[in-house]
Image (cartoon, rainbow, N blue to C red):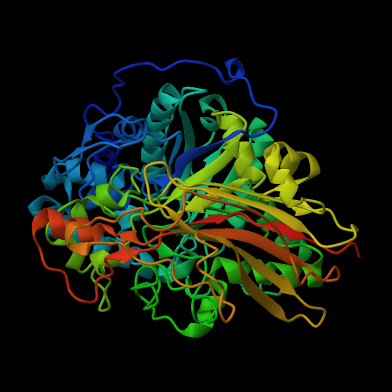
């Protein structure tokens, strides 16, 4: 008992990085000083999913940057990465949510800083020595820790409830102070949040929890540890309790459904029982948005589910072989509960049966970076974690965390970001936009995308203030089309290229619906594309836009594509008796991926299997139609 108490005391010591709790400047302003626009006039860019050295895995992977450095970097300041590389964004972000893992928050940092003589458990001592030996051994240690976590065999010291709670409380409060000081309403929004890492057996059911409030309310609670949980219900209970206690607001964002092994979007409740209307409503109320794309692959669609979608294969390499931890293999029958488009379709069917749609969610992208560096730029990619920051080996480096199967560095994406249509750059405005789903996700580029649905939009609307018309006579992305109207719904679709990026290839409307017999359908409509007078549709498809990528030089030219895509589109196959959703997918022209930049920078040769170019994209939140009856 004395040894356990001594170890717990050691873990409670040194839970912040040197200097991380010292803020170099105090930022000011109140949200009440910022005037909100009548309706959203601009998109705000941010990351809702970032890890710092406070995360149990990030620290062992080599991250030594805390929340302060993460916030400074997101605001556009230069910082030095954990491997000594100067890092800076070409363009600052507008907002950031640091979501360190609630489980074991600060624990590996504390273990690393503990006196070796105090550690008695042989397994913990082994990990301690590996962490201090070399970056490569430290990564192996993290793999073993995560494997033990997935199997439920972590040593007792990692499972001491009292020590964990006290350490988490201390780290959490220091973090809240830092976030509060860096929040600058009207200029930069710093949110408080954490990751609820639900992952029994290695199946990813993670959620990012984001608070609308400041420390006066968020400081009344601590993050929720999901170690012994199997379903998200306890998280929803926690969120309800927070709101009841403080009067604040909180939401959760599921992520990486692509490695949940068929568990994220089931037709049952979390425990495998028949889904009830009450359970469906709880999920919809607490989780209004999902993360559709990030470093660990793209979860929008899958070729197995959407064989007629020529663009469904993006970001799939390496992510179909198993769950997150590769403790279980994957079979195609799991895909339907792993991909967002299919979940949206399933939501329509469940609503038809239950009267409630549990999967009525919007879409964002974010990084899930574990380096404290929120960058989704291909030419400025710092890797999934600090063990694979820029270097000549990382593209071909196995990253399987000790499992028999593995994934390789090049299979990770340099993505993504969240675009939010908010009325001001404040916590209240941005959080409210997330809650009402007026958001979209990109794989990294910052293209500006608008999407409105209504019943009387015409091409002539584009000659005037069509944004005002969109809000006045229709609904934006994330909204619900009013039923009982005559005719067919029409949609305003607008996409502007990233000012510093590639031209656009096309904008597509993805439609999903359920018929009266309960059969699910989908169809992709190419509604506007570059050079429409030359690229004539043939066989129901638009010809490829072309390719200007010079892989050897990691360059491309904007001699193809277009800077702007705008149209009004009416659904030619609308059936007023059937539930449906519509969302927009925007594709850029092909551009080099980060491995091509690495090959140029480090004079290395990549394997033929490496994907060196891709068509980056954006996904809007859907607009739903529900029949009057």
Q: Position of residue 423 (x, y in %)?
A: 62, 31
Q: From what the image shows, is residue 474 above or below residue 124?
A: above
Q: Which of 13 and 186 is in front in this view?
A: 186
User: In this rendering, is residue 258 above or below 31?
Assistant: below
Identify the residue shown where x is 73% and y is 44%.
461
Between residue 362 and residue 106, name the one nearer to us. 362
Quarter that holds the C terminus: bottom right
| Residue 124 visible in the shown view | no
Residue 466: % across, % down: 70, 41
Viewer can see residue 407: yes
Q: Is residue 458 left or right of residue 143?
A: right
Residue 613 location (% of width, % of height) = 30, 64
Name the residue located 25 percent from the left edge and 78 percent from the top edge: 404
- Quarter holding residue 271: bottom right
* Residue 486: % across, % down: 90, 60
Residue in the foreground of this view, choosing between 251 and 340 = 340
Whether residue 461 sits left or right of residue 213 in the image: it is: right
Relative to 357, is 315 on the left or the right?
A: left
């Amino acid at each position: 008992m004395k040894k356990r108490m001594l170890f717990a005391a050691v873990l409670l010591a040194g839970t912040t990085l040197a200097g991380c709790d010292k803020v170099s400047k105090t930022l000011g302003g109140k949200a009440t000083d910022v005037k909100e626009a009548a309706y959203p006039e601009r998109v705000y860019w941010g990351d809702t999913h970032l890890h710092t050295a406070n995360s149990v895995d990030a620290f062992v992977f080599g991250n030594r940057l805390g929340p302060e450095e993460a916030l400074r970097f997101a605001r556009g300041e230069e910082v030095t990465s954990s491997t000594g590389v100067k890092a800076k964004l070409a363009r600052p972000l507008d907002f950031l949510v640091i979501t360190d893992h609630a489980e074991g928050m600060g624990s590996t940092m504390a273990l690393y800083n503990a006196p070796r003589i105090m550690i008695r458990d042989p397994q913990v001592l082994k990990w301690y020595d590996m962490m201090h030996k070399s970056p490569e051994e430290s990564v192996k240690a993290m793999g073993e820790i995560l494997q033990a976590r997935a199997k439920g065999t972590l040593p007792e010291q990692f499972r001491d409830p009292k020590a964990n709670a006290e350490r988490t409380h201390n780290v959490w409060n220091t973090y809240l102070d830092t976030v509060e000081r860096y929040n600058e309403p009207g200029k930069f929004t710093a949110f408080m949040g954490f990751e609820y890492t639900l992952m029994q057996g290695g199946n990813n059911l993670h959620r990012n929890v984001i608070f609308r409030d400041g420390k006066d309310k968020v400081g009344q609670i601590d993050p929720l540890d999901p170690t012994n949980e199997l379903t998200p219900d306890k998280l929803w209970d926690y969120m309800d309790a927070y709101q009841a206690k403080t009067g604040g607001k909180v939401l959760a964002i599921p992520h990486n459904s692509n490695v949940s092994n068929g568990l994220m979007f089931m037709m049952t409740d979390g425990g495998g029982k028949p889904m009830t209307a009450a359970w469906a409503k709880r999920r919809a109320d607490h989780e209004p948005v999902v993360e559709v794309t990030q470093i660990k692959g793209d979860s929008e669609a899958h070729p197995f589910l959407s064989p007629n979608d020529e663009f469904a294969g993006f970001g799939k390499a390496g992510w179909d072989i198993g769950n997150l931890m590769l403790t279980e293999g994957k079979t195609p029958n799991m895909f339907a509960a792993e991909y967002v488009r299919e979940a949206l379709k399933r939501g329509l069917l469940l609503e038809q049966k239950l009267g409630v749609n549990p999967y009525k969610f919007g879409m964002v992208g974010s990084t899930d970076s574990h380096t404290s560096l929120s960058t989704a730029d291909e030419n400025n990619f710092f890797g999934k974690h600090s063990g694979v920051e820029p270097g000549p080996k990382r593209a071909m480096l196995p990253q399987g965390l000790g499992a028999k199967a593995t994934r390789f560095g090049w299979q990770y994406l340099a993505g993504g970001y969240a675009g939010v249509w908010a009325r001001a750059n404040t916590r209240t405005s941005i959080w409210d936009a997330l809650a009402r789903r007026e958001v979209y996700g990109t794989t990294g580029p910052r293209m500006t995308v608008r999407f409105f649905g209504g019943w009387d939009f015409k091409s002539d609307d584009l000659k005037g203030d069509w944004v005002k018309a969109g809000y006045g006579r229709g609904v934006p992305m994330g909204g619900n089309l009013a039923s009982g109207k005559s005719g067919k719904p029409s949609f305003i679709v607008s996409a502007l290229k990233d000012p510093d990026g590639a031209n656009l290839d096309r904008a597509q409307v993805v439609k999903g619906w359920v018929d009266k017999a309960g059969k699910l359908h989908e169809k992709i409509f190419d509604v506007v594309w570059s050079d429409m007078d030359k690229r004539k549709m043939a066989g129901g498809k638009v010809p490829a836009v072309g390719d200007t990528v010079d892989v050897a030089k990691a360059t491309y030219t904007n001699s193809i594509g277009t800077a702007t895509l705008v149209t009004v589109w009416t659904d030619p196959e609308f059936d007023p008796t059937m539930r449906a959703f519509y969302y927009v997918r925007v594709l850029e022209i092909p551009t080099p991926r980060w491995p091509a930049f690495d090959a140029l920078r480090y004079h290395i040769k990549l394997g033929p299997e490496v994907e060196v170019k891709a068509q980056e994209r954006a996904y809007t939140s859907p607009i739903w139609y529900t029949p009057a009856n």
